[in-house]
Image: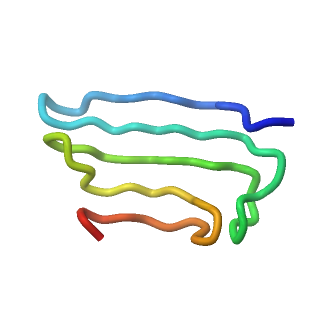
Amino acid sequence: MQAEVIQKERFQVSERGFVEIVIWAVPAPIPPSVHGYKYRLAYVLDGVCVVRFDNERGKGDHYHRGSE
């Protein structure tokens, strides 16, 4: 089984900002996460990512705030 997109949406929340949600079901957890999802949840304002939650191999579930 390959990764399967289960949700991919973008919501305009103002003239200057949007929220993006992308979730994939994956055949095995992305280490060190223990769940079967790969995801990206982001709030972007004026073309700059203000906050983003995601998971990636080696980092697991984590977030980014501004330029951090």
Q: Quadrant of the C terminus?
A: bottom left
Query: Which residue is pictured at 76% across the width and 45% down the height?
Result: 26
- Relative image position of residue 30 (x, y in whole percent): 71, 59
Looking at the picture, the colour scheme in use is rainbow
| Most foreground residue, 67 or 52 | 67
Q: Residue at x 12, y 28 (%)?
A: 15
* Image point (34%, 38%), residue name: 19
Q: In the displayed structure, does residue 31 sit left or right of residue 18?
A: right
Where residue 6 sits in the image (x, y, percent)?
65, 31
Left or right: 10 as drawn, with respect to 17: right
Residue 4 place in picture, x, y as percent: 72, 32
- Quick one: 55 or 10, which is closer to the camera? 55
Q: Quadrant of the N terminus?
A: top right
Q: How many marks?
A: 0
Residue 61 is drawn in which quadrant?
bottom right
Q: Is residue 66 above or below residue 39?
A: below
- Residue drawn at (31%, 57%) of the image: 51
**Relative horizontal placement of residue 46, taking residue 21 as reference (left or right):** left
Q: Quadrant of residue 33?
A: bottom right
Q: Is residue 56 above or below residue 49?
A: below
Q: Position of residue 55 (x, y in %)?
A: 57, 59
